[in-house]
Structures are given as structure tokens and as C-alpha cells.
Image (tube, rainbow, N blue to C red):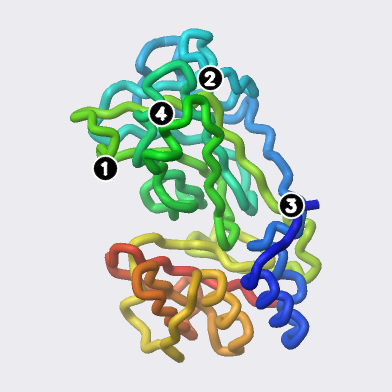
Amino acid sequence: MAHCEGIMCLEKNLLIFLFGILAWFYPLSCWCLNLTAVDLRGMQASQISDYQSNTAALRAIDGNTNTNFFHWSCSTTGINSHPWWKVDLGANHRLGRITLVNRGDSYNNRLIGAVVRAGIESDIFNNAACGLPVTSVQASIPGAHIQFLCDPPVIAQYVSVDDKDHMNGYEDNLITLCEVMVEEYPLEYCPQSTTAMIADPSVSITCMSTLMFVDKEVSDARPLSVLHMKSPMQCFMRCKITNECWSFDYDMTSGQCRLYDVKAGYLKADDQPGCLVYAVVRG
């Protein structure tokens, strides 16, 4: 069992004590529940192109974490201005952490600027980023296991890695992944499970919020309230204890949190860098 520390965790525990409807939710950001590894072997992986025949996308989910490129257990895309790699999990999972294993023998700095996304859209660029892009410090360590936290957890069928910012100094770019590991909070941990239709009527999720859009803000509704919060998690919790709230957006730069009474299927959003739009599932 993971250990919970810090003021944020204490604050969430207090909220649970005061507002019983949150009792089932608080562990998700503090990692008080066990994360369970998703076995990716045999799942469908793809990438924009193959660098060569023995660097196909499936090499990143073969269960082998060897970081020597020439041992042929790493996927590598062809050189491209915006390379990408993705895996189809086959069903919705509630993801909490994604780990990339970087190349260990050389060229590990090529992963600088890579973005991990997770969501329900097969078009990966419609899905939200988990965590921040890979930094130069993270990529400087050969063979590093680089972790990305999805906070709050994200309902996702697709996990992807892409790089379009060329932060690694190459005019053209490629992505090498020696392994991708995905961890989830099993849906059976939701004791107050309810179902809501999110965006596409064929897709259902249970128990919690899901990140629907990234770099967008709600454009067609007057907010119930405008607040300033330290994180999307705090914004979610405020929405959850506000009976009329069905969605919210959060500006990562300013910390502005806006609550709406608009349900998921009716959300309209415009482009806004650094803004996250969530839908909230209610029991």
C-alpha cells in the first residue's frame, strides 16, 4: 500500500470527513490505493512509422525493459516533424500513472519534450496530457524510468507519446521507447459506482470525473462560480460538493477554476492554451 504524505493529502482527508460524499474519492491523488499494472503484452500498438523493421511499436510493450537499442527491445519511430506512438488498451481503464523507459546506451536526450497523453479518443491529439513534458534533467539519465502522474486519474482506452516541440535540439525528431508501463485504479474500487455517458454515447465511465479536453475552455455557459485553486484536483473537489456542478475548467497558469451546470454531452469549448476541461460524474 502506498504511503500518503503532505498537506494536500491532509486537506482531502478533512474534506472527506466533512463531506461524506467524497469518502470514496480521496485516495486517488494521494496514491492511498494500490495501483495495478496493466499487462500491455499482445495489445495493439502503432506509431507514425518504423525507423527499421525491428523497432516496431510493439517492442515498447513486450515486457522487456532492456534499454540497449541494439538488443531490439525498443520501439523507434521514423524521423518526423511530429512523431507519435500509441497503444490501444482495448477497453476503458482508470489510469493513475504511466512510465516510459528511456534508451540507455546513447541518444537518451532525444526524449526531451515528449508528451504522454491518455484518453478515450483514438485521435491521440484530442486526449489530455498526463503530467508535464519530459525535461532535460529526466532525459539526461540513460535508461531512466520516467513517471507521469494522471492527477486526477483519467478514464482512457488509448495511451500515447508524441513530441512536436523539438526541445531535444534535432531539426527532425524521432521517439525511442524501451518500454511503456501503465498502471490503473481498478474500477471495482468505486463503491458508489454510477454510469454517465461522456461525449460519445457509445462510451461509458464510472464513479468519477474524466478529462475531456486539453488546451480548451468552456465557451457557451456562464459559470456558477469562479475560484482560484492550487490544482485540478482541488477544483474537482469543489465541483463535487456543489450540487449544481456538472463540469469545470481549470487554467494551469492562473489557477482559475470555473464551475458549470452544463452536462458533459452539451459542453462546447474553444482553444485556450493551458486550460483543462473536465466532466463530473454524479451518483
Compared with 15, 163 (above or below) is above
Q: Nearer the viewer, mark 4 or mark 1?
A: 1
> Which mark sits nearer the N-terminus, 2 or 3?
2
> Which mark sits nearer the N-terminus, 4 or 2?
4
Q: Which mark is residue 186?
A: 3
Dot 1 falls on a residue whose secondary structure is loop
Distance (Cα) linking label 3 and label 1: 34 Å
- Amino acid type at mark 3: Pro
The percent coordinates of residue 80 (x first, y second) are 26, 28
Labelled pair 2, 3 in contact (Cβ < 8 Å): no
Q: Is residue 282 rendered to the left or right of residue 49?
A: right
Dot 2 corresponds to which residue?
67
Dot 2 falls on a residue whose secondary structure is loop
> Which mark sits nearer the N-terminus, 4 or 1?
4
Dot 4 falls on a residue whose secondary structure is strand
Badge 4: residue crowd in 10 Å (few <14, some 14–19, many ≥20): many
Q: Which mark is residue 165?
A: 1
> Which mark sits nearer the N-terminus, 3 or 1?
1
Q: Nearer the viewer, mark 4 or mark 2?
A: 2
Q: Residue at x 80, y 67 (%)?
A: 191
Q: Nearer the viewer, mark 3 or mark 1?
A: 1
Distance (Cα) linking label 2 and label 3: 29 Å
Q: Which mark is residue 47?
A: 4
